[in-house]
Amino acid sequence: MSHCLHFGACGGCAVDDRDSIDKFLFLASALSRAGFADAPVSPLVEIPLRTRRRVDLAAARSGAKISLGLHRARSHEIVDMTECILLDPRIVTLLSPLRVLLRSLESFRRTGSVIINWLDAGPDILFRMDADATGPDRTKLISFARAQGALRISIAKAASEPELVAMLAPPVITLSGVPVEPPPGAFLQASAHGESAIIKAVLDGLPRLAARARIIELYAGIGTLSFALAKHARVEAYEGAADAVAAHDLAIRRKNLAGRMSVFLRDLARRPLKLNEFLGAAAVVLDPPYAGAGPQMKNLAASGVVRVIYVSCNPEALAQDAALLHRAGYAVEKATPIDQFPYSGNLETVVVFVKN
């Protein structure tokens, strides 16, 4: 990793030796803190470098200088990125033309961000700027889309709803064989390799399922896990972001999957599922935000559902939530660490909990 010229400045990587962080131990320690000493942890699944398909880049203007990249560790300063050992090289290739474009945009005054999702056929780009987009801005964004093969370009002022500026081809990502049109800037698993490893670990954790078995999925997003699960049971999915639910539901209807799955808009922090809503579920699968499942976890632990499959990107949050399952009488059947975030302390994991 020492050959990356940004290492030591860019906050994206914490170490220059991938093997210097024992992520197997990270997961074992997190589960031990939750009360699961000697939990069965599988060998670490390593995701290849240069495969990350999603990035949220910070942008800043200082006079004629445009900075585009990631922040320094524990700092607001932006490290102007010219290379990255983690990103798909096709995204890295966009950095230079993006700087040229940003320099010309009237809607970019001092700070902004550029979110890039590389979908099936190319990049889907969301610009969040600090001023209103002008007519000339839109013309430049359309020209950029054509020149760079962008499927879709959207723009928003600060945290407002994105406005579609250009769509040259359908912005589609295929999830377990189902085409989905994600909203601009949608959350995706960081890499296709990581997504596959997570899905495999989740499916391996399912119990033997009856013909009409029902799986409850929490924090379902655009359906990354849902469409894989629907091949094995009926899926009842919940998600708090309205645009993700709309994309998820549209994909279900277009693929005629309404008899196998359904998705509901629900803020699980404000309205967690109640105990009676878990009745009859063969399993609960959840992929909560970085901070964990929050208020939902108490009801889930008390529900008595026989099997809980927890997908986590934060060992600390996992330890906190798993402690509730331990106190409720669950055991760890299997835990799979997935190194989807090399050179950092972040770790993707799939843990299968079963009720004793």
Image: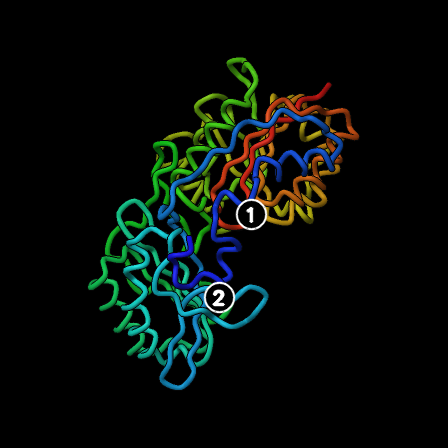
- Amino acid at dot 2: Ala
List x then y, in percent, for residue 51: 36, 46
List x then y, in percent, for residue 244: 48, 48
Few, some or many residues within 10 Å of mark 1 (<14, 14–19, 20+): many
The residue at which mark 2 appears reads as 9
The residue shown at (34%, 39%) is 174
Return the residue nearer the eye: 177 or 67: 67
SS of the residue at dot 1? loop
Direction from residue 109 to residue 319 in the image, left or right: right
Task: Say above or below: 276 vs 298.
Answer: above
Badge 2 or badge 1: first in the primary sequence: 2
List x then y, in percent, for residue 173: 35, 43
The residue shown at (42%, 56%) is 2
Residue 131, quarter of picture: bottom left
Few, some or many residues within 10 Å of mark 2 (<14, 14–19, 20+): some
Direction from residue 281 to residue 344 in the image, left or right: left
Q: Which of marks 2 and 1 is in front?
A: 2
Residue 164, quarter of picture: bottom left
List x then y, in percent, for residue 309: 59, 29
Q: How far apart, in angstroms, are the residues tagged by discs 2 and 1?
A: 18 Å
Return the residue nearer the eye: 164 or 3: 3
Return the residue nearer the eye: 248 or 37: 37
SS of the residue at dot 2? loop
Colour setup of the view: rainbow
Q: Residue 346 carries which label?
A: 1
**CB under 8 Å between callouts 2 and 1?**
no
Q: Looking at this rendering, what residue extends furthest in the right direction?
A: 327
Direction from residue 77 to residue 61 in the image, left or right: left
The C terminus, quarter of image: top right
- Amino acid at dot 1: Asn
The residue shown at (44%, 59%) is 56
